[in-house]
Amino acid sequence: MLTSSNKKTYLTALGPISGFLPFVLAVILWLVLAIHDGQILKKTENLSLFLSDYLFLKECLSIPGGVIGWAGAFLTQFLYLPWIGSLIWILLLLFSARLTVKAFSIPDRMAALAYIPAVAIIALNVSLGYGIFLMKGRDYFFSTVLGYISALIPMLIEKHLTSSWRIMLFRFVWITVGFMLLGTYAIAGVLASLISGIRNRNATVSCITVALIIIAPLVLYSFYTSYRLADTLYLGLPQISVRDWNTRIRTPLFIVLAYLPLMAMAPFRRADGLKWLHNGYIFNTTCYLIFAATVYLMHYGELTFRAEVAMSNAIDDLEWQKAVDIFNDAAKSRIKADARAFESRTAELKGVSDPQLREEIIEKYSARFYEPTRIMVLYRDLAMIKMDKALDYAFTMKDGAHKPVSTTLVPIVIQAGKQLYLHYGLENMCYRWCFEDIVALGMSVNSLKYLAMQSVATGQWALAGKYLDQLDKTLFHRKWAHGQRTLLGNPDKVSAAAPYDQIQKLMCIDEKMSADLSKAELYLLSNFTSRRPVNATPEYDKVALFWAMRSLNDQQFWKWLSYYTKSNHVKALPIHVQEAALFYNSMQKMADNLPIDNKVSESFNAFMKYADTHNIRSVKESKYPYEQRFGHTFYFFYYFSRDIASY
């Protein structure tokens, strides 16, 4: 039990701990962002754009709050180097907390309250998940903290203004000019300043301030043509293109904006305010731990999402093997968890004979078994095709359709359409989805790069030059643009350079702009299996055979196998092709004297023998034990991947 003497010593020791704790948590957050979420930060930068020219600045200033967007976009480009970008962001958050203490004169015993806006901003950015593909403007990562800092400026300035007329003059300039530059944040800052001084300021000044807050945005609206009057309250704030996400996005923003007037009315600002809180060590430490727990709970750390983003970045960088390694690493990380789930399910099913109860138990455990998402599978297959390994190794890896954990399911075509269509030689569809993305969400580095590559692949040199001119104005993508520029005007050089050497071999189809109904995977399947181009290349036939195998249609398989063997002059069939041929031939004899290796025949016979003694009562129940023995074969894929749904 603490005595009065050692209690003081104990609290004194807690003082440095509670004061130093925010910086410890900041370092932990930095490490998590840079290491654990580094690929997500890099993708965030790729989905944004900052151009160092007057036209870009002019476009940003076309709506109130444009300066916040411009500055946010400038800093977002540093996320290309996650260690640097996340460090800048965290330093800005700490700086905002320091300014909050000064603006509201928060006493040391309650210093933790200054971090509430920072925690809300952190929660917003780390909880987005798939929302990063839907954010408009793409400057949201930095713009919120910059906007909040700008909203504190009126409070800080008015502390040094002694006369009412100076305060009124400042507020007039700030509301009119500030609204044009900072949008909603300018109004929020003046409102907090008004509430803070309402007890000891001139009533006339207060009334004029309120009138300015209401009238100025309405008057200034007549000078703009690029936004709706209904959007006035959201100018300068991050926005998202799907309504279902509004609550998730706006709640942290409203916390930040509501914090300003609420803190302006806080009782500790009075001399007698909260005198009961004599010592803030316990209070501050408790708050910091609550903040840390909040960020931890809000952090979106879904394994498959992080794998998707990392694979997407690898595809952007043409690192095909890396994309496959990321896919396999995600599956390997869940091997032990899958084994534990199977053991637990087996123990619970033991002795249960009631079919309905068995189904309930199986359904309960089904979510515990790891499956990749469809985007992960599509990325993996693309990488295997580019490395010419798909027909030998693609079906040795996991397949599945794990449903992304997301407020709204983001279609594959929005996340990966540009990449898939470009590398599969469907250049018009790539072009279309680049502009779909630009119209809905704004220009980005990602869209400019794929527009440039599409133009280079199709020999549109002038158009490609225009897109590369834009990328020349970026900080980290000039080198890439320079490398692409060396290819312009030289078709032979393009045909020999990656990735165009492989893309152009798939561009033999007379592609027309058509509707994919936002179903990229189904469109690719239909495109490669429905018809064969007159000038089909051996590479095209090889890819078409792979998609025919994915279709699980034996007629398609035999048709494309014939094309493949003739155009590629095949001497030995790839392993998965042998497996599919042997499997389909066993169901309906279509060919004699198939060149099947002994190992493939032995594997197939073992599969059939196992199937005779282990009936497949349900796919969910039988999938794991079958996968342990035959998960590397085409026939396992045939039986256990039939009900996969794309999106």
Image (spheres, helix red, strand yellow):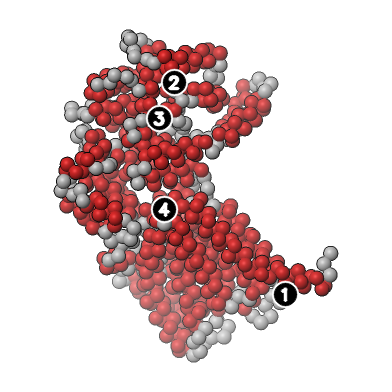
Give the amino acid at mark 3: Ala
Q: Is residue 251 visible?
A: no
Q: Is residue 355 positioned above or below 214 on the image?
A: above
Could you say which disc has been placed on residue 635 in the image?
2
Q: Which residue is mark 3?
A: 394
Q: Which residue is mark 1?
A: 278
Residue 386 location, quadrant? top left
Q: Position of residue 34 (x, y in %)?
A: 48, 55
Alpha carbons under labels 4 and 1: distance apart: 46 Å
Q: Position of residue 105 (x, y in %)?
A: 59, 78
Q: Is residue 214 positioned above or below 132 on the image?
A: below
Q: Are marks 1 and 2 in contact (CB under 8 Å)?
A: no
Give the amino acid at mark 4: Lys
Other-residue count near label 2 (Cα within 10 Å), few / some / many at <14 / 14–19 / ≥20: many
Quarter of the picture holding the N terminus: bottom right
Q: Is residue 532 left or right of residue 65?
A: left
Other-residue count near label 3 (Cα within 10 Å), few / some / many at <14 / 14–19 / ≥20: many
Q: Residue visible at 45% across and 68% down?
A: 147
Q: Is residue 321 positioned above or below 552 on the image?
A: below
Q: Nearer the viewer, residue 69 or 478?
A: 478
Give the amino acid at mark 2: Tyr
